[in-house]
Image (cartoon, rainbow, N blue to C red):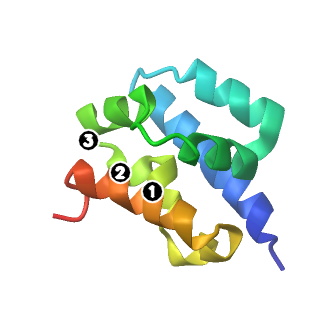
Amino acid sequence: MSDPESDFHHAMMGVYENARQHEYFATYFKGMLDRHGGLETARRLLAKQEIQAGLMKLWELGLLDRSMEALVVQERFAQLFPQAEIEEARRRLEELGYFD
């Protein structure tokens, strides 16, 4: 049986790896993952109201579906986050036209 927190961490590493494959080296994001793990990294990023530069870069690359925010709003990870964090991730994605 898989552990949701471990699955989320691996999915967050996938966000970094996918960006890297598109020539975007999110070193700050990777450092946070290495120091804090996937769940704590997401919580720290979601605590800020502004959209981070990394999400804007993924938007420019057409990779919003491969963002931390897109992971947070997935049903399979909903149990890991309070509603306020899920709503913040959804708000950012909505602002960038993800659900259109």
- Disc number lying in front (3 or 2): 2
Q: Is residue 87 left or right of residue 34?
A: left
Counting from the top left corner in percent of width and height, residue 50 is at: 41, 37
Counting from the top left corner in percent of width and height, residue 85 is at: 55, 61
Residue 29 picture quarter = top right
Residue 62 circle label: 3
Q: Residue at x 61, y 21 (%)?
A: 28
Q: Residue at x 43, y 49 (%)?
A: 66
In the displayed structure, 100 sits above or below 15; it is below
Residue at the far left: name it: 100
Q: Residue at x 72, y 62 (%)?
A: 7
- Considering the image in quadrants, where does the C terminus appear? bottom left
Q: Which residue is mark 1?
A: 89
Counting from the top left corner in percent of width and height, residue 92 is at: 35, 51
**Which amino acid type corresponds to the residue marked 3 in the rendered image?**
Gly
The number of numbered badges drawn on the structure is 3
In the displayed structure, 99 sits above or below 56; it is below
Residue 92 circle label: 2
Residue 70 picture quarter = bottom left
SS for callout 2:
helix
**Which amino acid type corresponds to the residue marked 2 in the rendered image?**
Arg
Q: Residues within 10 Å of mark 2 (few under 14, many from 20)?
A: many
SS for callout 1:
helix
Q: Give yes or no for contact between labels 2 and 1 (Cβ–Cβ under 8 Å).
A: yes
SS for callout 3:
loop
- Ranked by sequence position, the earlier of labels 3 and 1 is 3
Q: Residues within 10 Å of mark 3 (few under 14, many from 20)?
A: few
In the displayed structure, 42 sits above or below 90; it is above
Q: Is residue 8 left or right of residue 18?
A: right
Q: Give yes or no for contact between labels 3 and 2 (Cβ–Cβ under 8 Å).
A: no
